[in-house]
Structure formats: C-alpha cells, structure tokens
Amino acid sequence: MKSIARMKAVMIKEIRQLSRDRITFGMVVMIPLIQLLLFGFAINTDIRNIPVGVVDQSGSTAGRVITESVKVTQVVDVVETFATAEQAEQAIQDGIVRAALILPSDLTQRMVQGRELGQWIVDGSDTMISSAILSLQTMPLTDFDFEIRPAPTKTFEVALYYNPSRRSAVNIVPGLLGVILTMTMILFTSAAIVRERERGNLELLITTPIHSIELMVAKIIPYIFVGLIQVFIILGLGHWIFDVPINGAISQILFGTLLFIAASLTLGLVISTIATTQLQAMQMTVFILLPSILLSGFMFPYEGMPVAAQWISEALPATHFMRIIRGVVLRGADLMELWRDTLWLLGFTVIGLFVASLRFKKSLD
C-alpha cells in the first residue's frame, strides 16, 4: 500500500506539471485533432477542378460543345484559352495551367472518320494529375449522334510532358527536398534561443552590443550551408540513382532553395522566441510539419483540396517551394515565371526576421 501511495504522489505531481505546461497540453489535444481534420476533410484523392486551357483551332460549334462536355466532368476547370499549341505549352511550363486540350482544325472530319477528336497535353510531373486527365481519354460525348458515324475508341489522345513514363520518383524526389528542408531547418533554429536560455547564455548575449536583428541573422546563416548540403545530396542522389531529370538551371534551383531555407529558418526562430523549453520547440515544429507534408502538394495535389485547406496551404512556405522546385527542376521553368511564389518566400523571410527580433526584444524586457 505504501508503494501505491508513493506512486500516486508522483502521478499527481506529473499531472499538475502537465496541466501547467500550456503548450505541451495544447499539443496533446491539437496534434491528433489536426491530423483527424487533415485526413478527414483536407485530403482528397478524387481530383477535381484541375486548371486547364483550351486551344480550339476548329472554331466550330462542335469545338464549343466538346469544351462544354469536358467542363461538365468537373475533373478540369477551363481557366485559359490559347490561340496556338505553343502558347499552351508555355503556360504549362510556367505553371499557369496543368494541361491543355487542343482541338484541331479538321475536327469535323475527325468526327466523320471516327478518329480521336483532339489531344490533351499534360504536365506529367504530377502522376495524380496525369491520371486524372488520362481518365478523360475515353470520356463519352453524349451530345453527338455517333449512330450515323463510327465512334472513336478513344475520344482524345494524351501526351504527357516531363514524365512520359509516369515514374513516381520524378515527382517525389524534388518534393522530398521540401519536406526534409522543412523538418531540419525549422528543427535546427526552433531551439536556438531556447537553448541559449537553458544553458544560461542568454544573459551573456544581452550584455553584448549586438542588435536583436543581427542576432537573428547570425543564428540562421550557419544552417543555410547545412541546407545547401542537403540540397546537393538529395538532388544529386535522386538524379544518379532514380534518374530524376534536372531540366532547370542550377543557379535558379539554388536561388529558389536559398529563399525557402531562409523562410524555414526564420519560422524556426519565431518558434524559438515563443517556446520556453526545447521540448516545446520540438512539439511546435511537429505542429507545423504535419500540414507542411499533407497540404503543400507533396503527397496530394493542391487542386484536390477543399477551399479552406487551400487557404491554409497558401500560408505554408513549403507549398510555394514545391511549386518552385518542381517547376524549375522538372519543367525547366524560370523563377521570373514563378515570381509570385518567389516573392512570397522573400516576404515571409523579411517579416519572420522582423517578428522574431521584436519577440526577442520583448522577452528581454
């Protein structure tokens, strides 16, 4: 009985400590809740409303009917019209659309002969997107009377760009770079200020003439080099072992990655100014890591998410980096063509440094 009483006393002590640690107690509740909501509502493998363009070279009523029939499927959302196939290809490379439907000038003749009515050109770097477009290859066209003409065995041809063999490694390896950098960069700096406080070095930093913004920048610079090493390892091995193509310029890849590393490190610094222990910092890192993996487009296409999940996704640095790294590495896109995501990462870094320095000043006061 005495043993049970002693154990009970320790148990009560642990429960009281847990209840006083609001961040830890909050994580115990929030992490499973977020996982449930993400998997239950935000994750949707049934892809809908893929942004596509149309090149109607026929200019006929049949072309307009086919376009409307494609819209009705709700698999795609026609957001652009192009005059030429070259414009459509450039839009796919720039990430404006994920695919384009080309209806040729001899559309009526093809209908009479029972041939494919057009061709889809698709960004094949995302295998789930390409699978969704491939499902339209044999879609029925009920608005046409095929009883008096031979119906085509395939309604459309499909041409997959950037990943014609539909290898999953081509899509996963560049995305994996974003996940690993998110995890390591935030984890490294999320404990930066907390570690100084726990070791008793914070008072020493206070007495130095360094400004808070200078301290924040100095804290993240060493980890930038660590991140660059990870970039060369992942992309190098991915290209060598899995034959992942690198179609973009190395300078573009490095600059885009530097912006993302800086954004992730500043996010870690903000966490470090909020957490009071390294355990709390790690818990908050996990809290951010889960949405970054599930909502950034790494595992599931952005287009398949509900609107609310897309809003959350847009607030994550990993989402913008996924677009940049896949665009540059796989499609050979230029950062100027991806300027919105590039500018977002730059702005996030500047604001993050400002917030971290302000919070550090407040903690000193």
Image (cartoon, rainbow, N blue to C red):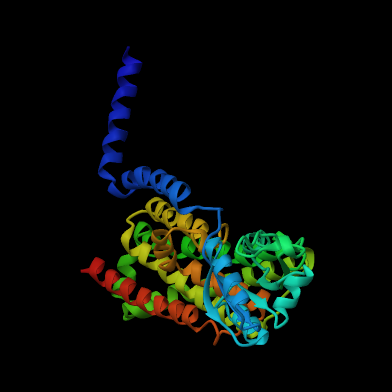
Front-lying residue, 80 or 117:
117
Front-lying residue, 203 or 351:
351
One can see residue 184 in this view: no
Residue at 40% x, 47% y: name it: 31
Residue 13 location (% of width, % of height): 28, 33
One can see residue 255 in this view: yes
Which image quarter is the C terminus in? bottom left
Front-lying residue, 344 or 277:
344
> In the rendered image of this protein, does residue 87 appear above or below residue 34?
below
> In the rendered image of this protein, does residue 305 appear above or below residue 12?
below
Residue 272 location (% of width, % of height): 37, 63
Q: Image quadrant of residue 25?
A: top left
Furthest toward the left, the residue is 365
> In the rendered image of this protein, does residue 126 appear above or below residue 281?
below
Residue at 35% x, 43% y: name it: 29
Residue 285 location (% of width, % of height): 43, 57
Q: Image quadrant of residue 357?
A: bottom left
- Left or right placement of residue 239 versus residue 190 in this view: right
Residue 269 location (% of width, % of height): 39, 67
Furthest toward the front, the residue is 148
